Amino acid sequence: MPKQQANWSPYDNNGGSCVAVAGADYCVIAADTRMSTGYNILTRDYSKICKLADKCVMASSGFQADVKALQKHLAARHLIYQHQHNKQMSCPAMAQLLSNTLYYKRFFPYYSFNVLGGLDNEGKGCVFTYDAVGSYEKVGYSSQGSGSTLIMPFLDNQLKSPSPLLLPVQDAVTPLAEAEAVDLVKTVFASASERDIYTGDKLEIVVINADGIGREYMDLRKD
Amino acid sequence: MASKQPENSLLGPEADSQRTLYPYVTGTSVVALKYKDGILMAADMGGSYGSTLRYKSVERMKPIGKHSLLGASGEISDFQEILHYLDELILYDNMWDDGNSLGPKEVHNYLTRVMYNRRNKFNPLWNSLVLGGVKNGQKYLGTVSMIGVNFEDNHVATGFGNHLARPILRQEWHENLSFEDGVRLLEKCMRVLLYRDRSAINKLQIAKITEEGMTISQPYSLKTYWEFSAFANPAQGAVGSW
């Protein structure tokens, strides 16, 4: 009898979309709360957003077990950092740590598509976007997950700033006010829910600014 | 099966004989919901060996510590191994003798870590687990799959239960179900599974866990009705279809 191949996959895609938008003094991070497998919905109320540090929040979609393990890993590393340095990790520092953590498993990756959002040491909004193996970039806005192909072009249309290669150097962060950015995110998810079967149920929006971290929810289509 | 490989070697073809390829004796769906006083969980007592119904008195739900109830579908021997791990976990918890005890949330987290770590080693425990319980008035109901996907919700199900029971639960579940209503709802789900899941058998138990403790019913059967005219002549009016 020839050698049996594995008839199970260590990966699954639990779907969902994530978005982050950076502003002059705020950052908006949002993700839907639907968790699926294949054509089934497992639960309508699962948060994809995780607070890693005081001013640093990560939203991840993809394979939920890997996402959970990644979140735990980073939270543990942050705790060690706090013990060693007696301060919170800054968002850019956490961004590098996430990249290194993902690349560490380059040959059995975390199937996790992440956007990191927060405030840098000067209080300016920053967003970092990743692929599954850790290549990352600081950007003004980004989306990941099953709805990203629908969401990203719209964000580009509304928010794209001139190329960073041009001189004089332009700011990556959006000129929008906080309330406008939140509205934009709501619009974007409402649209994605129409056409992406894995996005829907409820939208969770986290806003980080000088006052701290705020959270709000919006209902999305349940179909 | 003799192997000269050390137990944890992942290299070489000989080590592959140590890894799970497919399940042998399996249990089918587990369905559970939160109700007013705690958690209700139902599972039938069948252990199938492929298409043969080999074992008819398998208890697929077990109490864990003081506050939790574990139900499992999938490979029965892997379920027994998980119970062995949990025995040790609860033992160590008791040995602290500090008045504290592991609640359902903690047990669920432990199980998630175990399942995920086995998946990382490409040697999964072939189960879908349902973990429910009450501690300090807080009800908890969660599930873990064989690759470590986990979540908690007001009602959960494994296997076929996801397809047949969850829609019924989404329609009819509400907060603060009475015990009778909860049982009635679970029986409705189990009846549909009995009609439509080939591996389901008509011998089930319903377990209840509340702040006071856990009770599990004696095995019993559901009343079924097979005299629907559609069953009598299924092909009528639909030539060649099922």
Image (cartoon, coloured by chain):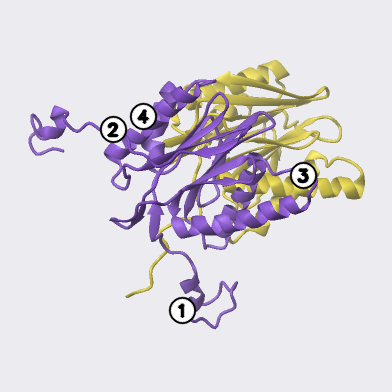
Of pointers 2 and 1, the one earlier in the residue sequence: 1
Marks 2 & 1 on one chain: yes
Apparent side of residue A111 relative to residue B52 in the rendered image (left or right): right
Amino acid found under the numbered disc labelled 2: Lys
Q: Nearer the viewer, mark 2 or mark 1?
A: 2
Q: Which residue is denoted by mark 2 in the rendering?
A: B223
Q: Is residue B71 left or right of residue B239?
A: right
Read off the residue under disc 1.
Answer: B1
Residue located beneath label 4 in the image? B188
Q: Which residue is disc 3 drawn over?
A: A94
- Secondary structure found at label 4: helix
Viewer-side label of 3, 4: 4
Q: Are marks 3 and 1 on the same chain?
A: no
Look at the image and tell me whether residue A217 can be seen. Answer: yes
Look at the image and give the colour of chain B.
purple
- For disc 4, the chain is B
